[in-house]
Amino acid sequence: MKRVFNFNAGPSALPLEVLQTAQEQLVNFNNTGMSIMELSHRSKDFEQVHNEAIERLRKIYAVPDNYEIIFLQGGASLQFSMIPMNFLQPNKQADYILTGVWSEKALEEAKLFGTPVAVASTKDNHYKNIPTANQIRFNNDAAYVHITSNNTIYGTQWQEFPTTTVPLIADMSSDILSKPIDVSKFALIYAGAQKNLGPSGVTVVIIRKDLLEKTSSNIPTMLKYSTFTYNNSLYNTPPTFGIYMLGEVLKWVEKQGGLENIAEHNEAKAKLIYDAIDESGGFYIGHAEKESRSLMNITFRLADEELEKQFLTEAKEMGFVGLNGHRSVGGCRASTYNAVPYETCKALADFMIKFQAKH
């Protein structure tokens, strides 16, 4: 079959090599006579898959020894609740920096458990940019600071992370593993897998051990981080197939030469499309301000609304999938996650240039 040009925002493109490996191993994994989906999560075969995925992620991200890596379910949206439930004490506030819809949702969930405060927001600018350091008013006594590192809907991304004196927590669902980062700057990182890590169903949490000591005591067992750190994420049946696929994606990342090479590749891919926008003379209009642009989600509109509809229709006919903007804002969006090939981004840039020339 002919594969499409996949720009879906999530679930998103997976490396073809990983899909082919999964296809080969689907019926008989590691000569067990069973699929990975049929193996007991207590079996040695699955435990090896599970532990190797954790160690591979630790190595790729250079995660320090004083951090735990756990696999959860419920997506990033469950983390919006788990974080304040575990770490927002009744007499404390938590600082939230609003840069889009997902940070708004995180703030709203935190209101159920304590006093979250928006210490910076770019909503008045239609979330076209990331706040600058002098626009943020941190509370030095806050329980934590929460940010969303990349904003899929608006196409903005933190270029430099804020420096705080309290635990920094980041939702990295849509740009995890897209570039090297210093994990030690964060007390907790969480990410739904369905962008850069694998299929939907797995949530990765990287958590500093000292933060676990601040966990509230009156929390349901399944909503405590310590439940999963104490049990190596195997307290109950984990999403075994998703963890297997995550491990295969991490192997693929290693084969690409690690995060330095991944980042360089992502910059080259995004440049193709941003150049088509910037050199169009206003035919295409980028949403994000240049200093806040995302390498993962490129958002833009056409100056003419009817032409925009035609653009999306013709793009679909040419085999481009997922270019419609989020339903809340409309427009166009190209999600160029790690697994989206350079050739796919080149094809889109070429199509944009030809479409403009025609109209």
Image (cartoon, helix red, strand yellow):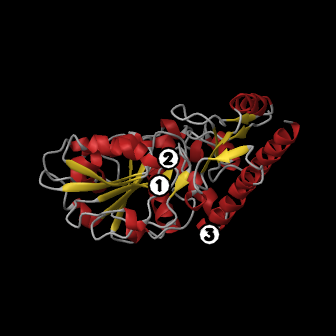
Q: Nearer the viewer, mark 3 or mark 1?
A: 3
- Asked if 111 appears above or below 306 in the picture, the reply is below
Residue 17: mark: none
Residue 236 position within the rendered picture, expressed as x and y whole percent measured from the top left: 32, 41
Could you tell me which quadrant the N terminus lies in? top right
**Residue topped by disc 2:** 193
Crowding around mark 3 (Cα neighbors within 10 Å: few <14, some 14 to 19, many 20+) is: some
Crowding around mark 2 (Cα neighbors within 10 Å: few <14, some 14 to 19, many 20+) is: many
Spatial separation of the CA atoms under disc 2 and disc 1: 20 Å
The three-letter code of the residue at mark 2 reads Ala
Judge left or right: residue 7 versus residue 53: right
SS for callout 2: loop
Judge left or right: residue 280 versus residue 119: right
SS for callout 3: helix
The answer to which of marks 2 and 3 sits earlier in the sequence is 2
**Residue topped by disc 1:** 48
Could you tell me which quadrant the C terminus lies in? top right
Residue nearest the viewer, comparing 238 with 4 = 4
Residue at 63%, 57% (x, y): give it.
252
Residue at 67%, 61% (x, y): give it.
267
Residue 121 position within the rendered picture, expressed as x and y whole percent measured from the top left: 39, 52
Q: Nearer the viewer, mark 2 or mark 1?
A: 2
Is there a contact, CB below 8 Å, between mark 2 and mark 3? no
**Residue topped by disc 3:** 260
Q: Quadrant of residue 189?
A: bottom left
Residue 151 position within the rendered picture, expressed as x and y whole percent measured from the top left: 50, 49
Spatial separation of the CA atoms under disc 2 and disc 3: 20 Å
Residue at 44%, 59% (x, y): give it.
131
- Asked if 244 appears above or below 262 in the picture, the reply is above
